Amino acid sequence: MKKIGVLTGGGDCPGLNAVLRSIVKTAADFHIEVIGFRDGFRGVVMNEYFLLTPREVVGILIKGGTILGSSNRDNPFHFKIHKNGKTMYADLSDQAVENIKNLALDCLIVIGGDGTLSCAYDFMKKDVKLVGVPKTIDNDLNGTDLTFGFMTAIDTATDALEKLHTTAESHHRIMVLEVMGRNAGWIALQAGIAGGADVVLIPEIPFSLEQVVGKIRERKNRGRNFSIIIVAEGAKPKGGEQMVKRLVEGSPDPVRLGGIGGKIANELEEMTGFETRVTVLGHLQRGGKPSAFDRILASRYGVAAVRMATQGMFGMMASLQGTEISAVPIAAAIKELKTVPPDGELVRTAQSIGISFGA
């Protein structure tokens, strides 16, 4: 093996640069040249890349974001183009494959979540040799216990809850914190436990506002004149639907969720009489330097990806199973989302320490 390519796709995530650093340094040990594609699959389609040498990755371990750039909009199989003054979409996957062949790449390492890895799987059908690395703050990718970036997002959400606690208690308010997660409630659940939330609302357990109000009134009866609620962006009421903020055409995952926090805050203020405020944490969860845990996990994934490539383990994704890094088929990783088991140990733990799920 002489040359590999690498790209970072989807939303940015703390730890991306740590993976890139690990890939480049490990590849250097094998005397393998590394080509970095700019802005995810867009760089493969447009043939935009640069040589990644050990010099290029000096000092990036602790930095957030990705030195390659990323995109969650440029699906090569449904790629936005402008022709005759009009915007349209075309399948440019063959163009991407041709660029990979012309660069004489022995393998392409794709770092991304289910949307990016689904694109990678489609390229596998075109005989592109691929290795996957699991990346998402949502931790919803199947086949691995943890994705890098998730623990940093938990730290960010937990810090926000801690700060909201003091202002909620001072002003006798209900504070609602809306966090990311798409259709999985891992961030809301684990940050809720770590940050001392009173109510956790997640997509896997449809909620009733009456039950949430009951929890708030129970706290008031005990002299607790404030409450902290953390809600995943994909949470929905019983018999209701998720709140869709917008649709992004051309994206592997076009649905953008959001707005549930504000809706809940308005309704709770009316139902309880408590002054209520909402904070949408948004892209703060994606930004900033990765935690020590995520730097280590990302570094392990990068080393594993290069070794998998040298061993011809194409079509596989690096995976954390227990305490060990192993490999699983990309097809299995994208088959279905990994969501919170409603009757799982984490939910039972939250319930045992007094957290309500509004159910």
Image (tube, rainbow, N blue to C red):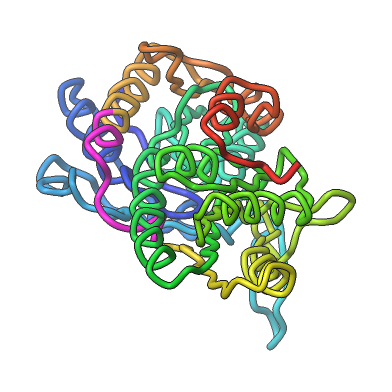
Which residue corresponds to the image point at 35% horizontal and 52% vertical from the top-left? 156
Q: Looking at the image, is 355 positioned above or below residue 222?
A: above
Left or right, 357 with reference to 134: right
- Which stretch is magenta? 284-296
Residue 295 x, y percent position in the rendering? 25, 36
Question: Which quarter shows the N terminus?
Answer: top left
Residue 59 x, y percent position in the rendering? 11, 48
* Residue 163: in magenta span: no
Which residue corresponds to the image point at 84% horizontal and 49% vertical from the top-left? 238
Residue 314 x, y percent position in the rendering? 50, 20
Which residue corresponds to the image point at 28% horizontal and 56% vertical from the top-left? 288
Query: 27 and 224: which one is in front?
Result: 224
Question: Which quarter shows the C terminus?
Answer: top right
Query: 348 and 88: which one is in front?
Result: 348
* Residue 295: in magenta span: yes
* Numbered marks: total: 0
Q: Looking at the image, is 126 positioned above or below residue 263?
A: above
Left or right, 335 with reference to 299: right
